[in-house]
Amino acid sequence: MKKPEADPVVARNRKAAHDYHLGESWEAGIVLQGPEVKALRAGRASLVGGFAAIEDREIWLHGVHIPQYSQARWFNDGSRRKRKLLLHRAQIDKIERKVNESGLTIVPVTLYFKDGRAKVEIALARGKKTWDKRHALAEREASREAERAVSRRRKGRPD
């Protein structure tokens, strides 16, 4: 009997797309402890405010909130502790070069399970200015209004 194909998404960082211009992204494994995995399987995590940093040629994830699993009796560590990300050495070196050259930051975008293992999608990001955010909101509102007008026309309603 085959396992289901769908990879359940535990958490998305929607705020990252609002606050940053997202660039190249990578899928990384994440080192977790037993109760953290159970908490993720229960669908409880938050990527908002999280970032990744390179320390001693390793990538560490900071500020990601994985709450304590209530049924765990042992080793319920800090919910915002730093966690190691698993990437190939060449990928880490490439990310480090881009961060140092361009002044980019590394943000987590999605946290999910793939083949039973917890994965996090990280992306290189450049911070948006306030006017960029307003411009993006205005564009999104204009496209929604255009879609509404087309829908009204199809249904034969007057504008």
Image (tube, rainbow, N blue to C red):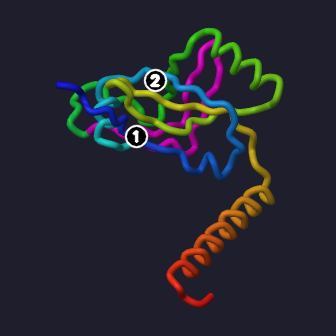
| Residue appearing at x 29%, y 41% in the figure | 42
Magenta stretch: dominant secondary structure: loop
Can you give x and y, in whole percent of width and height, for residue 79 in the image?
42, 36
| Residue appearing at x 78%, y 56% in the figure | 132
Q: Report the amino acid beneath label 1.
A: Val
- State which region is magenta: 45-69
Of residues 96 and 157, which is closer to you in this image?
157
Label whose residue precedes the other's in the sequence (2 or 1): 1
Q: Report the amino acid beneath label 2.
A: Ile
Q: Is 154 left, or right, of 37 in this rendering? A: right
Can you give x and y, in whole percent of width and height, for residue 116 in the image?
32, 25
| Residue appearing at x 76%, y 62% in the figure | 135
Residue that sits furthest to the bottom in the current view? 158
Q: Which mark is residue 30?
A: 2
Instruction: Give residue 22's quadrant in the image.
Output: top right
User: Is residue 49 a member of the stretch shown in magenta?
Assistant: yes
The secondary structure type at the circle numbered 1 is: strand
Q: Which mark is residue 9?
A: 1
Of residues 99 and 70, which is closer to you in this image?
99
Residue that sits furthest to the left in the current view? 1
Can you give x and y, in whole percent of width and height, for residue 100 in the image?
79, 23
| Residue appearing at x 75%, y 39% in the figure | 126
